[in-house]
Every structure is written in C-alpha cells, then in structure tokens.
Amino acid sequence: MPRAVAVFAIVSALAMGALPAGAAEFGTRVEATAMVKRVQEKFRREGPEAAFRAINNKAPGFADRDLYPFVTELTGLCVANGVTPAVTGKNLIDLKDQDGKFMIQEFVRTASTPPGHGWVDYRWLNPVTKTIEDKSAWIERMGNYFVGVGVYKNEQPNENTIGLISGSPNSDDTYLQIGYDLADVLNDGDNLRILPIAGIGGPRNIRDVRYLRGVDIGLTQTSILNNFRRSNERMGQNDDKIVYIAKLFNEEVHLVAGANITSIEQLRGLKVNVDAKGSGTSYSMRDVFKTLGIEIEEVSMPQAKAIEAVKSGEIAATALVAGKPVRSMSMLSSADHLHFVPVPYSPQLQADYYPSSLTHDDYPDFIPAGQSVDTIADGTVLIAYNWPKTNVDRYRRVQRFVDAFFPKIAEFQKPPRHPKWREVNLAANLPGWTRFDAAQAWLDNQHQASAEEPSGGGRQTVQLDGVARPGVPNTLPQKDAALYQEFLQWKKMRQGR
C-alpha cells in the first residue's frame, strides 16, 4: 500500500470513522469501557484470533455508532481495528497526534504501568467536520496487547457536569455568588464542571431539583423546605425525593424603612416590598408577617427601585432575605435617612428561623459604630434529588460533587469568596430531613478517622461571633434568652441524630 494511502487509512481509523450527524448518536465513556470489557471477555473465552476477527468484521457488540475497538501489540503493531482493518499489520508506535504527542506510545505506557488501564487524551481530525477535536480512549492491557475504545470528549458534556439552580439575576441574591464560588473552586477540566443556572427563587428551586431535567442540585431556604414538607403532609403525601447535602449558612432579614417606622408592628396595613414574585424573600417574608399576625399590603419590585420608593414615601418599607453584607444594602448611608427595622425573634418563629443581628461591621456607612439591630435569619440549604444507587449515572454525578466539595470547604472560606462561607459547618444537621447518602457517608468516614486519631476527640467547632466555640450553632444572639432557647433546640436536634 502506498505510504499516503496508509497514512490516510490510519488517520481515518483513529478518527473513529464516519459519524452520525446528531450529537445524541455519539457513544459515552461508560459504553466505551463496556465495549473494552466485551473484547476482553471474548479474548479470554475464544482466544485472540476470534476476538480480532469479531473486531475487524464489526460483529454485533463490537461496533456501535462512533465506538469501535482497536487492538495493538505492546510493540505498537496493530492487530485489529473496527473501522479500518487495512491498518492491521502496521507498526504505529511513532504515530503522533495533531499536537505532536506520541499517542500509541502513551497507550502502551498506560497499558504497561499498574493498574494497566486508564483514559488517554489526544487530538485528531474528525473526518465528518474536518476539524481537530479532543478525544479520549479507554485503554486496557490484554496479555501482550492493549485494547482501546475512544470517544469524542466534546460529546460527553453531561457526564461530569453538575447543574446547580441558584438565584435570580433580578434580585440581590446571595445564591448567585455562592453558585459562582462553587464553579470557580471546583471546576476541574473534564473531571468536574459546576454549571450555575439562574433560578427564580427558593420555592421554585425545590421544584426544579425535583422535576427539571439537567438540574442536579440547588439552593433553597430552611423555612421554604420545611413548609414544602408540611404542605405535603397536610395532603397525606410523603415525598422523599428531596434530600439535603449540607446546611450551609444563615441569611439575614433586612427590613429597611424611614425614620417614622421604628417597629415591625407599625407596618400593619402599609405597603411593604417583599422582592420579586416567586423569590425566596417573597416566600419567607410572607411567612414571617403571617406568623407574626401582621397583615401588610404586598409590593413586588427590585431592591434598588424599592429603596427609592421608601425614600419618596411611595412604600413604607422593603425587605430582603440575603447573606450579609448585601450589595444593595451596603450602598446605603446615614445620608439616606433610612434605617434597619428590628425583627423580633418571637416563639412562633423558632421552628424555622434563627436569631441574628446586623452590626456596624456589616454596614459601616449605615449602622453607627457600636450599634446593632436585632433581626432573624433563614437557613440556606444545598439540596439534591434523592437518586437511588441503581441510577448509577445520576447518583455518581452528585456523589462526585460531594467528594470534590466537602474536602475543599476551607478554600471557600478564604477571600474573595462570599463571607458567608466562613459560617459553614458541614456536619450541621437539618431536622426532619435526610442527608444525601454519599454526603452522610463522607461525614461518617471523617468522624471515624477523627475518633481514631490519638489526640483527636472528634469534637465539632463552629463559628459564633467570629469565634470558634465547641458545640454551639453558628448563629448570632438577639438576647441571652433567645440564644439559650436556640441552644436547647440545637441540643435536642443533636440528641435525635
């Protein structure tokens, strides 16, 4: 065979031959490794010649769309190729990819080095698109040979991609920055990609995780999640499709009004902005006002517009539930003649909310030095769909996220990440909810490892007022009585583990 023809044959073979036009017709990594296993099994059962013949003749199970096996001796001599059998008998040991990589030598090295298998990346011409594309082949040793099956990497976008439903771009939402932080820290080439998706708000985020294709995990609020469960219970339903990965941090209620409003009770019957319709703030603040027995006239508008409306007297106040410091609130100053209205931590709110405060350090241009404002906070929860282990792809996808996220929590607690990351205690429980199995397993393993350390008592510490205190939940007190009540609630939760 003339050299030019031989080279073209090799190129065509390694490019995986003619491909279907639709991306959905491309093989996956899982299917590629399964095909390698079939070759290995036939090789063991029927011998080399039968296995090579099945590959070269494209027997059922040995050719599937763009997937096909190739077998080469460890010397580089090709003995079987599922697309172009004509390359058999040729030594390809010095063949290079488009970047000059000795790809066959890399295949041999992978097969010859323990554990004797792995993925090898290279770049090659796609005979359909006529463009250079990224490819990856699963290589396994087979006696004195290696067998490989390759895939187009660009056609594997969903394998290691985690869809995260976060916050609304129309609201001053902490969730958006949290989503960006997760992507920035955890994205790892083809191994893991976090894809933040703009959401509508906490209530819809639960439904999106529950039903929306492509959404694996999401952010929502404790009060919303608990009301979701209570609503199902009232209808006699036990929906176990939502689990939590971790309770992250608390989001404070920011209630801004003019000088004439000094208590939340004074808002009764007045116009109060509760952020965009369907947002987490809208849902939680409607819940708070209802629980406190304060009937308001709801208004829905973006925070920047709402602040101006409070200044002009068009509305009495605006509310926002978000992790301090919040961008829109940080722009306020004493010159605006507005202030934060205290939100009392009443007994009716203790089931879903926590006591907190807004301080001068949080908003130095708005709260005078040495002063603070009592408020309440809602918890932020990272949730997932309760995939069974039998759904290997979806379960492992979320498990892969957990295994990447949990060990790197310290990275999130460094600047320039959102300050709220510093409050996160991964071991904190969410009463009434089941943690995703892989997340609980990771924590259990860490707990066991800590207990086995000679100097380790395995005692958890969390952040309170910026100080690590053993055994105290990460909230800020309104007053001693409220903190004590919360501690009792937290202690009860721990005892119920």
Image (cartoon, helix red, strand yellow):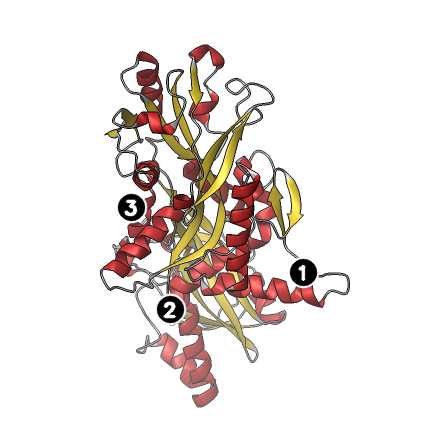
In this rendering, would 127 be left or right of 108? left
In this rendered view, identify the residue nearer to me: 8 or 30: 30
Amino acid at dot 3 = Arg
Labels 2 and 3 touching (C-beta < 8 A): no
Residue 61, image quadrant: bottom left
User: Who's the residue at 30% across and 78% down the image?
Assistant: 60
Q: Which mark is residue 204?
A: 3
In this rendering, would 6 be left or right of 291? right
Earlier sequence position, callout 2 versus callout 1: 2
Residue 153, image quadrant: bottom left
Q: Quadrant of the N terminus?
A: bottom left
In this rendered view, identify the residue nearer to me: 443 or 292: 292
Crowd tier of the residue under label 3, counting other residues whose Cα lies within 10 Å: few below 14, some 14–19, many 20 or above: some
Mark 1 = which residue? 458
Residue 483 image point, x, y percent? 55, 43
Amino acid at dot 2 = Pro
| Furthest-right residue in this view | 455
**Mark 2 or 1: the one toward you:** 1
Residue 8 image point, x, y percent? 40, 57
Q: Is residue 155 above or below residue 168?
A: below
Mark 2 = which residue? 388
Residue 151 image point, x, y percent? 40, 60
Q: CA distance from mark 2 to mark 1?
A: 30 Å
SS assignment at label 1: loop
SS assignment at label 3: helix
